[in-house]
Image (cartoon, coloured by chain):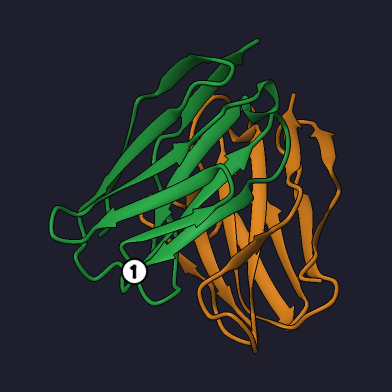
Amino acid sequence: GENVEQHPSTLSVQEGDSAVIKCTYSDSASNYFPWYKQELGKRPQLIIDIRSNVGEKKDQRIAVTLNKTAKHFSLHITETQPEDSAVYFCAASNAGNMLTFGGGTRLMVKP
Amino acid sequence: GAVVSQHPSWVICKSGTSVKIECRSLDFQATTMFWYRQFPKQSLMLMATSNEGSKATYEQGVEKDKFLINHASLTLSTLTVTSAHPEDSSFYICSAKILAGVPYEQYFGPGTRLTVT
């Protein structure tokens, strides 16, 4: 089955700096890669996703890149703000079926 | 749109009792619902995939006789934790896929915090 590795597990940045979180996946058949933000005790919230026919996608301060050959994808957050502090999860799925999640990254943005 | 609810939001039960958690898609019909378990400071782990009118598919290591899943309609799936033990204490989250819509996206419920004493 699919295996998703996520790094780093914790990330501390100064407000205004950029944050980058990286994930690798094992199943070359995976074609959908969402990123979720989860605050303590709450549901995961989809912040951006990318499909395998696209190499990069951007939404305001958030961007995701995908390298199918290397089987890795990354989340980039620019101009970080304290409200960006949360746990971020990457995930991968095949044709919209079950999601396999990475281990999560705890992002702390220091004001 | 695409709202998923769960009930209850939290529950405390005694060891050996059973607990039922409901997952509802409020404004859409769901082809498939998924049940996840999340322990503190850990990731979401898929427990089972539930399709309306058919038996759930459980992930390896998840006891199907302990975690009973019923998907009786296109808007409701239930997870029953039978003979609960303290190690079953966790955050249970469901998600749903829309019957007719974006095929890839899943919509998550708010989760149910289960504490077994």
Question: Where residue A3 sits: x, y (%)?
Answer: 27, 50
- Residue visible at 48% across and 37% down in the picture: B43
* Chain letter tied to green: A
**In the displayed structure, would residue B20 be above or below residue B113?**
below
Q: Residue at x 84, y 43 (%)?
A: B9
Q: Nearer the viewer, residue B25 or B112?
A: B25
Q: Tell me which chain the residue with mark 1 is part of.
A: A
Image quadrant occupied by the N terminus of chain A? bottom left
Q: Is disc 1 placed on a helix, strand or loop?
A: loop
Q: Quarter-wise, where is residue B68 in the image?
A: bottom right
The picture quadrant where one finds residue A32 is: bottom left
Image coordinates of residue A34 in percent, x first then y, are 47, 56
Closest to the observer, B19 or B96: B96
> Who's orange, chain-wise?
B
Residue B76 appears left or right of A16 = right
Q: Which residue is mark 1?
A: A54
